[in-house]
């Protein structure tokens, strides 16, 4: 059983009627319902909860954290960001969605500004699978389209991804690295581009399929934990060298 926590700032849905019409129960609940699987145990957390819903206990009980944010990146407490970073270093998976490219946690883990070009014109996005052998692409067609999405365009200010899984083309002509993997410490990170709040992207079965695959991929492998720090006892006998 993979323990999944879906974090959403849950601000747009409460103050913008257009967004509330698309996601009346919040983006987090739409994703939770859409990726529901017998092998997942899913909880949600939001910005307005104590400790943003990401207490030490919740994170310790989370295998993969999914993160969506946009309007309130600056409202996320730095201590919680540090807490999430430490859990990623220790093996928790992180799936970063759409405008969470500007979240404190993603920028902290990337070490770059994570900026990009953008345009809200409700244009068509075609998502190409450029690494069909990757587990996150399993079960997908070679490409699929979203009829209306926000455009993101290069240059995307991120480190070179460990693996590039998807590339997007937009009706206006731009292209974008829309599915990227990274490793930080023992944790695996996947950034996935689609998901503007005014479009019903998180009801699209291909998008949900990608997120399900990403959760399975990012889940901890339960490999042996690395041992670091001072090691006073050697594995082999050290011969005492006589002074010359």
Image: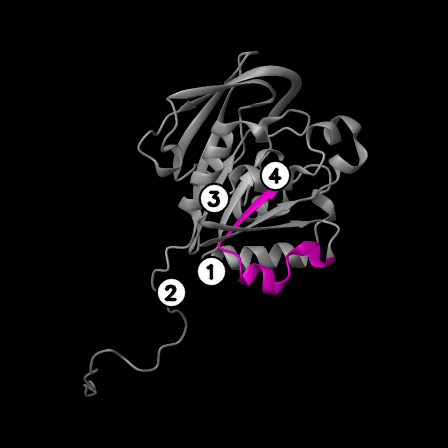
Badge 4: residue crowd in 10 Å (few <14, some 14–19, many ≥20): many
Q: In the rendered image, which residue does mark 2 sit on?
A: 225
Q: CA distance from mark 1 to mark 4?
A: 21 Å
Q: In the rendered image, which residue does mark 1 sit on?
A: 90
Q: Are marks 2 and 4 in contact (CB under 8 Å)?
A: no
| Residue 170 versus residue 28 in the image, above or below | above
Instruction: Give how far across and how far down residue 69 sits, in percent.
Output: 66, 40
Comes first in the chain, label 2 or label 3: 3
Q: Most extreme residue toward the front, as rendered? A: 38
Q: Is the C terminus in the top left, top right, bottom left or bottom right quadrant?
A: bottom left
Q: CA distance from mark 2 to mark 3?
A: 28 Å
Comes first in the chain, label 1 or label 4: 1
Instruction: Give how far across and how far down residue 196 sits, in percent.
Output: 63, 28
Comes first in the chain, label 2 or label 1: 1
On the question of residue 102 being in view, the answer is no
Q: Which residues lie in the magenta part?
A: 50-68
Badge 3: residue crowd in 10 Å (few <14, some 14–19, many ≥20): few
């Amino acid at each position: 059983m993979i323990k999944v926590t879906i974090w959403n700032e849950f601000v747009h849905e409460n103050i913008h009627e257009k967004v509330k019409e698309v996601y009346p129960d919040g983006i987090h609940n739409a994703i939770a319902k859409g990726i529901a699987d017998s092998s997942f145990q899913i909880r949600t957390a939001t910005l307005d909860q104590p400790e943003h819903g990401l207490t030490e206990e919740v994170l310790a009980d989370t295998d993969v954290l999914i993160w969506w944010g946009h309007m309130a990146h600056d409202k996320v407490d730095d201590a919680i960001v540090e807490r999430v970073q430490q859990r990623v270093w220790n093996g928790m998976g992180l799936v970063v969605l759409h405008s969470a490219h500007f979240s404190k946690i993603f920028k902290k883990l990337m070490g770059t500004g994570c900026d990009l070009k953008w345009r809200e014109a409700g244009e068509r996005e075609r998502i190409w699978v450029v690494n069909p052998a990757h587990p996150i692409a399993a079960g997908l067609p070679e490409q699929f389209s979203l009829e209306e999405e926000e455009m993101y365009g290069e240059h995307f200010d991120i480190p070179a991804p460990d693996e590039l899984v998807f590339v997007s083309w937009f009706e206006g002509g731009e292209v974008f690295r829309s599915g990227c993997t990274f490793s930080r410490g023992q944790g695996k990170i996947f950034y996935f581009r689609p998901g503007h709040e005014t479009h019903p992207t998180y009801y699209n079965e291909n998008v949900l399929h990608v997120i399900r695959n990403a959760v399975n991929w990012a889940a901890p492998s339960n490999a042996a934990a690395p041992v670091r720090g001072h090691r006073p006892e050697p594995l082999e006998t050290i011969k005492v060298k006589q002074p010359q």
